[in-house]
Amino acid sequence: MNTVIQAFGLVFAWDVLIAIFASAIYGLTVGALPGLSATMATALLVPVTFYLSPIAAVATIITASAMAIFSGDIPGCLLRIPGTPASAAYTDEAYAMTRKGQAETALGICLWFSALGGIAGTLSLMILAPVLAEFALSFSTYENFWLALLGLMCATLVARSSPIKAIAAMLLGLLITCIGIDNPGGVARFTLGSTDLLGGIEPIPALVGVFALAEVMRALTEREPPKMPHRRLGSILKGQIALTKQYPKQQARGNIVGIIIGVLPGAGADMAAWVSYAMSKRFSKTPEKFGTGHPEGLIEAGASNNASLASGWVPALLFGIPGDTITAIAIGVLYMKGLNPGPTLFSEQASSMYALYIIFILANIIMIPLGIVMIRLASRVVGAPRSAVMPVIMVFCAVGAFATAGNNLFAVYCVAAFGVLGFVMEKNGFPVAALVLGIVMGTMVEQSFVTSLIKSDGSVLPFLSRPVSGVLAAMTFAALLWPVFSWSMEKLRARRAVAA
């Protein structure tokens, strides 16, 4: 109880409460702007966290990401333009409800079930993380190596693009982490004679570049979204309790799917929403109603994407393995604030962990009143011209990278270079999430591998002979060979079709 009381004291400090409220408004605003993602909103917050206390810094990441995921539903409902990728799965369904004159119901579903899903995901984090932390304390560098490698392989499996492209993007991220002298041998690698590269590529400028600056470049190549017509809305939450009682299975299934997918490295809220919407249609008694403005799929997918947010913190806090791109950024913030991810975090800084749980619950509770206000102001926010928004984002990218890198101009060049890289990769179907996971986890993979070889005097047998390590190795090889198996099966089916 003393730990819980300390956690409440940490959360209800004036600087943390201000950070939660300010980041909530920021997340709602950015999420409602079509084309901008929750990940981009989180990346732009990193320079701000540099000046905050550890709990306030983590609170801004949690609150802004949760708000942005919900707020992306607003332009989807009213304009048929998803504000964030996590809203794309059910945009047509929500817009169909709006065309039927049920805009209030659609927006209410998105708000109400997003909040409930976020709370369910937080409960999963509270239950799973401490239990897994005790198990993870027995892990050595052998298990950590296979676990990190398995996380990278899973990220390639869940990518919506070609698995080969996902593996290529992941390997590029690993190659980027090899730059500099921060390696077990202390040898300068790939520095090209530049003293700026001796320290390697910092993850924060790279993340800001591929997520924030690449979004700006993408926005410049796309058409301006249409202006939202003025629409007088009635009560937003009217009928939501009745829908909660009518569709309990859909809500529970969405929460469970979101929690499971959130734990998978590299999956994220958008993947959870797509899977949940497809499952809702598959198991529905009235699948023919989907696409016509039916609330069933909207409830399940809306609960799923927010549930995945909290559960994505489970591998991030335990092993430093990001569950999605948002937690990849959060890991950098945690290290910057001295909250190094790992199983000992739950014993040595238990009050901080309880504070994190409280922040998640608080963020999802205040989402409801603030979400209603944002829905009322949606026409003004969604109609913000890109010519005014994008220059501000570019300034934040440059100034933020400059500040967090110790006033080093090289970090600004890194943001620009990774912005171009992220833009080109997205245009050609290479998933940026796999690149980011490679950058974040590359050091962990290399150090665990080299340390294990030193301990075993160069022998690879302990990597396979230890029970847990052997199981993780088998799972990693299965994930690695899965793209080859899938490709072979497709070729075989194609030959059979031609023969038929």
Image: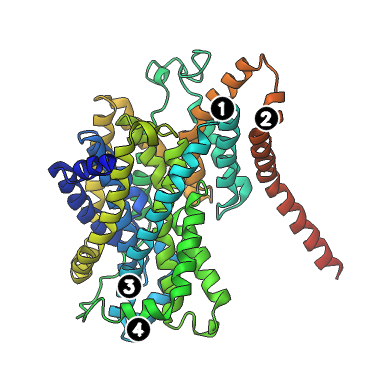
Q: Which of marks 1 and 3 is nearer the N terminus?
A: 3
* Image quarter (top left, top right, bottom left or bottom right) of the N terminus: top left
The first of marks 1 and 4 along the sequence is: 4
In-image side of 373 versus 197 (left or right)? left
Instruction: Kindly identify which residue carries mark 2.
Output: 466
Question: What amino acid is at disc 4?
Answer: Arg
Q: At which x and y percent is residue 338?
A: 32, 29
Residue that carries the numbered disc 4 in the rendered image: 99
As displayed, is residue 392 above or below residue 255? above
- Calculate the distance from the C-alpha at mark 1 to the C-alpha at mark 3: 51 Å
Cβ–Cβ under 8 Å for marks 1 and 3: no
Q: Which of 350 and 262 is in front in this view?
A: 350
Disc 3/disc 4 C-alpha distance (Å): 10 Å
| Residue 438 position in % (x across, y down) | 51, 36
Mark identifier at residue 79: 3
Res 419 visible:
no
Mark 1 and mark 4: Cα distance apart in space: 57 Å
* Mark 4 residue crowding within 10 angstroms, few (<14) / some (14–19) / many (20+): few
Percent position of residue 443, x then y: 49, 27
Q: Residue 140 carries which label?
A: 1
Judge depth for marks 2 and 3 and give the one in front. 2
Residue drawn at x 72%, y 24% is 461
| Cα distance in 3D space between marks 2 and 4 | 60 Å
* Residue at mark 2 to residue at mark 1: CA–CA distance: 10 Å
Q: Which residue is drawn at 30% across and 73% down?
A: 107
> Mark 2 vs mark 3: which is more N-terminal?
3
Q: Which amino acid does label 1 sit on?
A: Ser
